Amino acid sequence: MNAILAFGTVMLFLLIGEWISHLTKAYVPSIFVTAILFLIGYWTFLPKNIVAQASFGPEFANVCISLLLVHLGTLMNLKELLQQWRAVCIALLGVVGTILLTLTIGTFIFDWKTVIAAIPPLTGGLVAALLMTSGLKAAGSTTLVTLPIAMFVFHSVIGYPLTAIMLKKEGRRLVTKFRKGELDDINNEQKQNAITQNSLIAKFPSGLQTASFILLRIGIVALLANGLALLTKNTINANVLCLIFGVIAHQLGLLEDNALNKAGVFQWLMYGLLAYIFSQLNITTPQIIGQVVVQIIVLMFLGILGMFTASWILAKPFKMSGEMAFACSLTALFGFPADYILTTEICQNVAQSQAEENMLVNNMVPKMLVGGFATVSVASVIIASVFLKLL
């Protein structure tokens, strides 16, 4: 396929998703629609490498995710990030609920290996699914090799609309409190801190503050974060370090607020990363799904039920609403960037003013981001490594 045609097709799918999300007032999330379009496309007429042909290959995606995470660090302060420990606990305990319910009830319905093969991709992203697939091949379990990848595809599609429903309920709850004056506008505090935070950058003449200067600084911060992850043998995930380093650089005044938007490339990088994520749907077929559809539906229902139960029970002790706690746990089904896109989409739709949107973003986005990192970036790899030994 011609590179320009491939690029146009990818953008068309993203556009259709955005338009449908807007027309349905975010009840149908854009990434859900785009994922379905890519899935149907791969099963019918799309070449498997269309995203790579559109220039959104793995190398570009690796650059995107590091730069985007550093950028997201410029949207929050260190105190705000540290306050999200509750979201981390809720997300991880939600995963525990998934594991417990699938291991207990699931093993009464299916054999041990089937349940073990399904849990890591159910509680994490593509990396966990690929690890389990490799482990099943090595163990000679050829009949189950397709299960982890099929589970990854299926639960991502289910997870998007379910999370959107929870976030919309939480957004409406917060807006109602905000309009009654029962919720502080923490964005005002951030604006007051911005003068101090950006003092180093403000000293440069405006003519020198170009997009390349912003990107260079973000790139250096991302390089340092990835370098530390490499030195510590990924003891702390590189993605987590990029977010933390972004927050620190912002606090020190080395990066301005909303850095990538000021450089004019935020949406471009986000679209590139999204396209790459959707390209992972090309590894399955209707035949593969058909072979394990019963196992997928039953185990996914049990897993999400376990997640819901744990989240709802723990929400009050952790001072969260049930909807927000469940949404944090659901990040295990997809992680970044879907958690960020879903949340900001809901914030834009629910809010009726810029102040309300800022309030929603400041209250919801950090929780969803750290929840996604705790589950997909960290816990899922650990779970997959442990469960490989149980096959």
Image (cartoon, helix red, strand yellow):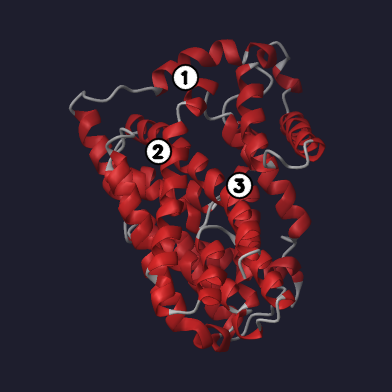
Residue designated by label 2: 364
> In whole angstroms, how far apart are the C-alphas of marks 3 and 1?
29 Å
Q: Residue 190: which disc?
A: 1
* Sequence-wise first label, 3 or 1: 1
260 vs 47: above or below: above
Disc 1 secondary structure class: helix
The local crowd at label 3, few if under 14, some if 14 to 19, many if 20 or more residues have their Cα within 10 Å, is many
Residue type at tag 1? Gln
Residue pictured at 69% horizontal, 67% vertical: 51
Q: Nearer the viewer, residue 34 or 209?
A: 34
Q: Is residue 347 left or right of residue 283?
A: left
| Dots 1, 2 in contact, CB < 8 A | no
Residue at the image point whose x is 41% and y is 50% from the top? 94
Q: Quadrant of residue 44?
A: bottom right
| Mark 3, residue position | 378
Is 21 rendered above or below residue 191? below
Label 3 sits on a secondary structure element that is helix
Q: Is residue 201 left or right of residue 373?
A: right
Question: Relative to 25, is 48 on the left or the right?
Answer: right
Disc on the earlier residue, 3 or 2: 2
Q: Position of residue 286 (x, y in %)?
A: 54, 86
Which quarter shows the N terminus?
A: bottom right
Q: Quadrant of residue 6?
A: bottom right
